[in-house]
């Protein structure tokens, strides 16, 4: 019984916090690989998520504070576990499944570094989202490195 109460309190706390996206559904699979698709080469010359994911990422900016937007964005990309947190294992699998071959090794090392510095410290009870913000800024820092192949 105590276990059920704790789970309910955690989900209610996460759902009600203004900074965090709604708590994950108890029956959903984690990570949500249905949101994973190969990165798309954009006109800017870098690989990014597909249009549908990018629309969800941009929608997060309208629904959350700047400090806490990254949890919503990670959820939009299907990068959170059942507790609503990112993990190295999820990021490794995501890179393996969706990143272009030429960027996989670099991206894995890059995201692991972000996780070691910030991701492992994310606390869903932190209303200021200190480490979630730092982790998000770190992970988005990979974008300039995801260059598309040059046309011959």
Image (spheres, rainbow, N blue to C red):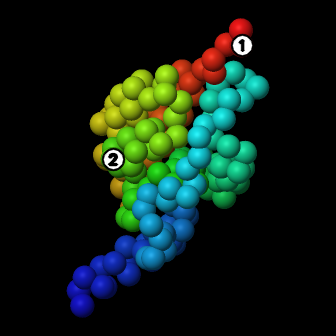
Image position, residue 41 (x, y; %): 68, 29
| First of labels 1, 2 by sequence position | 2
Q: Is residue 48 left or right of residue 7?
A: right
Q: Is residue 82 above or below residue 12?
A: above
Q: What secondary structure is found at the residue carrying circle 1?
A: loop
Q: Nearer the viewer, residue 4 or 38?
A: 38
The residue under the point 69% across, 21% down is 45
Q: Which residue is mark 1?
A: 151
Residue placed most toward the observer, 26 or 136: 26
Foreground residue, 114 or 109?
109
Vertical order, 152 against 63 (above or below): above
Picture coordinates of residue 49, whole percent (x, y): 63, 41
| Residue found farthest to the top | 152
The label nearer to you, 1 versus 2, is: 1
Which image quadrant: the C terminus? top right
Q: Is residue 135 visible?
A: no
Is 14 on the left-hand or right-hand side of 115?
right
Q: Residue at x 65, y 49 (%)?
A: 53
Q: Residue at x 63, y 17 (%)?
A: 149
Can you give x and y, in whole percent of width and height, for residue 104 in the image? Answer: 44, 29
- Across the whole image, how many numbered discs are drawn on residues? 2
Res. 34 visible in picture? yes
- Compute the Cα span from label 1 to label 2: 34 Å
Q: Position of residue 146 (x, y in %)?
A: 56, 24
Residue at far right of view: 43
Does dot 2 land on a helix, a strand or a loop? helix
Q: Nearer the viewer, residue 112 or 36?
A: 36
Image quadrant occupied by the N terminus: bottom left
Circle 2 residue: 89
Residue at 25% from the left image edge and 82% from the top image edge: 3
Q: Identify the mark at residue 114; answer none if there is no mark.
A: none
């Amino acid at each position: 019984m105590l276990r059920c109460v704790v789970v309910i309190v955690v989900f209610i706390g996460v759902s009600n916090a203004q900074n965090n996206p709604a708590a994950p559904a108890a029956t959903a699979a984690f990570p949500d690989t249905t949101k994973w698709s190969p990165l798309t080469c954009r006109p800017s010359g870098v690989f990014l998520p597909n249009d549908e994911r990018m629309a969800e990422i941009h929608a997060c900016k309208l629904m959350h504070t700047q400090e806490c937007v990254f949890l919503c964005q990670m959820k939009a990309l299907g990068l959170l576990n059942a507790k609503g947190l990112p993990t190295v294992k999820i990021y490794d699998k995501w890179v393996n499944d969706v990143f272009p071959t030429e960027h996989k090794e670099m991206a894995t090392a890059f995201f692991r570094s972000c996780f070691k510095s910030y991701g492992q410290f994310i606390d869903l009870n932190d209303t200021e989202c200190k480490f979630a913000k730092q982790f998000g800024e770190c992970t988005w820092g990979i974008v300039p490195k995801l260059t598309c192949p040059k046309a011959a």
